Amino acid sequence: MATLNRKMKITTHEGATASHIGAIAQLERSVMSCLLWEDEFYESGQTIAQRIGELVRQVPAADAVRVAVQAKEEMGLRHMPLLLARELMRTKEGRAQAKELFPRVIVRPDDITEFLAIYWKNNKDEPLAKQVKRWLGHSFRQFDEYRLAKYNGGQKAVKLRDAIRILRPKPSDAAQAELWRKLVKGELATPDTWEVELSKGGDKKASWTRLLNQKKLGGLAMLRNVRNMTQADVKPKLIREGLQNIKAGKLLPINFIASARHNAQFESELEAKFYECFAERTKLAGETIILIDVSGSMDAKLSQKSEMTRMDVACALAMIGREMFKNLRIFTFSNHCVEVPGRRGFALRDAVIKSQAHGGTMLGESLKELPKCDRLIVITDEQSHDTVPQMKGYLINVASAKNGVGYGQWIHIDGWSDKVLDYIARYEASQA
């Protein structure tokens, strides 16, 4: 009889042999590039979310907390950390970590309501764990009237007034008790935000002009609304000044590519601000190669509502890499390995996208064609048609597919934030 005592072979969705990895590594690769419940090229959002829930119960709670905080603070993800928090609250060990977890992932008032919506997604009658009520209630104390009013609107299944009635937090003083009474009664002062201003239906040009003059727009709001300002006939000089006032904050590199896509006349300003926001990095010497996946799966949109793709993510990281690595050559792979001209900024983005047809995923063969270098970085969704050799290098995974090829000798990094490149600098400094 044939033996059953064999290690099962696992493969990528494209058929290449994938690596066996532990539950913590599986959780990291499923989380760090995932927009919650959004379908990816190879897997449905529901499948990914279900796998994450199962993995949370397999790993030590402290490690799941670490992953949630990293997803929030380094990768710039909002809903995924809330799902991790919800799954942790299903276990005794996880509930014991609530004190460490909730202050790190609940940073806006609507994080409370989004968490509650996720908590009751499959069972509206499930009672809240004691630790959940305590620490969500505690989170209410950090928000002033402006922030509560700013995030109190919208067509939401769970509203802030619902949350405060359910959680029954204890106010720190009489002023806070009055603030919460006004929240429940709908008496909060209307916040002066761009959403409120534009919802009035008045003169859009006048509205945008006032908001820009009074510096009422945050960085992300500014990037997302350049096209709306242009369509409202706002003076270009004023828009340029607004772009110049952007601060890095929690912006992601891809936010600039998204804005530039529909605002060609402001591309030079957006490019300059991109360099400024992501410039504070250790400059690394040596001969570096970045190999970018331009296969068809990388053209998949990040979400149903987004025009941005994982290709855009890879291009944004390459644009930062051009400024970070002193001697850099960039190649792409699909059916072939192709070198990209030594451009920078948005010109580099264009060169990467146009470098070759976006077809297959011949990563293994492409790696064999690369010249020798001191530092190899592969940016990919980590699927491959062919066998990928074990090599010393960094593999940055920008998708959430279950299995991947970049383990073993590879230094594996999950995520699409600019922080993944900071990890390379930190790692090499620790090895010096």
Image (cartoon, helix red, strand yellow):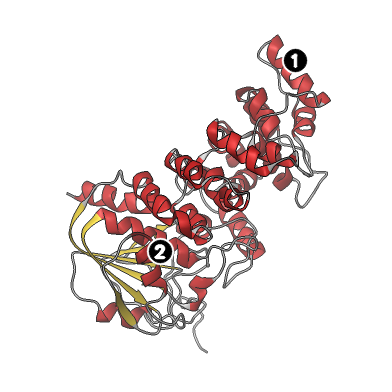
Q: Residue 42 in the image: x percent, y percent? A: 57, 73
Residue located beneath label 2 in the image = 315
Query: Dot 1: what SS?
Result: helix
Residue located beneath label 1 in the image = 178
Answer yes or no: is residue 53 visible. yes
The residue mark sitting in front, 2 or 1, is 2
Name the residue rendered at 50%, 61% in the picture. 261
What amino acid does circle 2 point to?
Answer: Cys
* Residue 217 vertical position relative to residue 32 in the rendered view, above or below: above
Query: Mark 2 packing: few (<14 Cα in 10 Å), some, or many (20+)?
Result: many
Q: Residue 78 in the image: x percent, y percent? A: 57, 46
Query: Dot 2: what SS?
Result: helix
Query: Could you tell whether 125 is left or right of 152 in the image?
Result: right
Upstream in sequence: badge 2 or badge 1: 1
Query: Mark 1 packing: few (<14 Cα in 10 Å), some, or many (20+)?
Result: few
Query: Could you tell whether 328 is left or right of 55 in the image?
Result: left
Mark 2 and mark 1: Cα distance apart in space: 50 Å
Answer yes or no: is residue 64 visible. no
The front one of 239 and 270 is 239
Name the residue rendered at 71%, 45% in the picture. 119
Name the residue rendered at 32%, 83% in the picture. 365
Q: Residue 95 in the image: x percent, y percent? A: 61, 37
What amino acid does circle 1 point to?
Answer: Glu
The front one of 99 and 374 is 374
